C-alpha cells in the first residue's frame, strides 16, 4: 500500500484495482466478515427489492467534487492535501455519497463524508468504507470533524461507533465550533 506518498493527481497512471492500495469490490467481498452474498446485495438490490448501489473507486476528482458540493461550507479540493476516495453510486451511476480519506499519518487519517441520500447506509457499504483505512491501510484510528450544530451527522456517526473526543472552538468554519470524533480499529 504505497498510498501515503501519492496526491490525488498521482493516481491517474495506475491500473484499475492498484490505485492507492484500494481493492476492487470483489476483493473487498472476499475479505469482510459478512458472507459474499450479503455484499453482492449492494450491487444487485437487496431483499426488499431496493435498487442496487455500487462502490466507485477510480474517480477521485468526481467523488471529491461531489463531497465538496454537499458540505455546508465552501472548501477547495487543495485543502485535503493527499487523498483517496470511495464513492457510492445508484443504479444509474449517479453519485449519492462519497468518502474522502485525507490528512494521513502512520496510524490515523481524517474522513470527510457527504451524501445526498440516506440510501447509501447499508451494512456492506459501511463495512467497505471502514475496511479501507483499518484493514488495507492498517490504521489504528480514523478521525472526523463535524460542525457542532450538525445534530444529524453527529447522531449518525456516533451510531456507527465514532466517539466524541472533544470540541474545538470556532474550528469548523471560523464561526461554528467543531466536534472531533474518533474511532479505533477495535471499535
Image (spheres, helix red, strand yellow):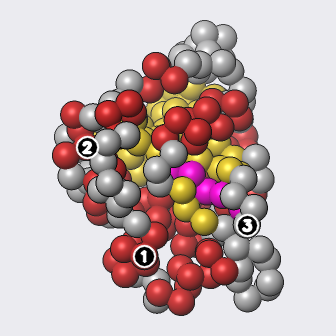
User: Residue 161 in the image: x percent, y percent?
Assistant: 51, 58
Image-based side of 172 in relation to 57, left or right:
right
Q: Name the residue under label 1.
A: 26
Q: Decide: few, some or many residues near mark 3? Use Cα within 10 Å; few <14, some 14-19, many ≥20.
A: some
Decide which of 31, 58 is in the foreground and name it: 58
User: Residue 147 in the image: x percent, y percent?
Assistant: 63, 29
The residue depicted at 69 percent of the width and 30 percent of the height is 69
Relative vertical location of residue 152 with respect to residue 24 in this rendering, above or below: above
Disc 2 + disc 3, Cβ < 8 Å: no
Tell me the quadrant of the picture where the C terminus can be found.
Answer: bottom left
Relative vertical location of residue 38 with respect to residue 102 in this rendering, above or below: below
- Magenta stretch: give its range: 86-90
Q: What element carries label 2?
A: helix
Image-based side of 3 in relation to 83, left or right:
left
Q: Is mark 1 on a helix, strand or loop?
A: helix
User: Residue 170 in the image: x percent, y percent?
Assistant: 58, 13
The residue depicted at 57 percent of the width and 42 percent of the height is 63
The residue depicted at 45 percent of the width and 70 percent of the height is 25
Q: Name the residue under label 2.
A: 3
User: Residue 112 in the image: x percent, y percent?
Assistant: 53, 38
Residue 143 visible in rendering: no
Distance between the Cα atoms at labels 1 and 3? Answer: 18 Å
Q: Name the residue under label 3.
A: 91
Nearest to N terminus: mark 1 or mark 2 = 2
Q: Decide: few, some or many residues near mark 1? Use Cα within 10 Å; few <14, some 14-19, many ≥20.
A: few
Amino acid at each position: 500500500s504505497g498510498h501515503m506518498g501519492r496526491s490525488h493527481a498521482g493516481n491517474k497512471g495506475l491500473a484499475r484495482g492498484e490505485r492507492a492500495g484500494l481493492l476492487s469490490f470483489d476483493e473487498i467481498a472476499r475479505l469482510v466478515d459478512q458472507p459474499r452474498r450479503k455484499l453482492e446485495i449492494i450491487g444487485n438490490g437487496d431483499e426488499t427489492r431496493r435498487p442496487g448501489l455500487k462502490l466507485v473507486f477510480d474517480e477521485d476528482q468526481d467523488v471529491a467534487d461531489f463531497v465538496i458540493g454537499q458540505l455546508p461550507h465552501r472548501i477547495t479540493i487543495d485543502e485535503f492535501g493527499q487523498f483517496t476516495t470511495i464513492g457510492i453510486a445508484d443504479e444509474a451511476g449517479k453519485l449519492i455519497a462519497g468518502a474522502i480519506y485525507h490528512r494521513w499519518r502512520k496510524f490515523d487519517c481524517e474522513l470527510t463524508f457527504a451524501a445526498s441520500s440516506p440510501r447509501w447506509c447499508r451494512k456492506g457499504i459501511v463495512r467497505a468504507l471502514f475496511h479501507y483505512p483499518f484493514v488495507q491501510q492498517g490504521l489504528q484510528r480514523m478521525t472526523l470533524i463535524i460542525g457542532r450544530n450538525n445534530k444529524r451527522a453527529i447522531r449518525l456517526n456516533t451510531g456507527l461507533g465514532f466517539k466524541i473526543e472533544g470540541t474545538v472552538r470556532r474550528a469548523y468554519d471560523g464561526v461554528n465550533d467543531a466536534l472531533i470524533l474518533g474511532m479505533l480499529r477495535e471499535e
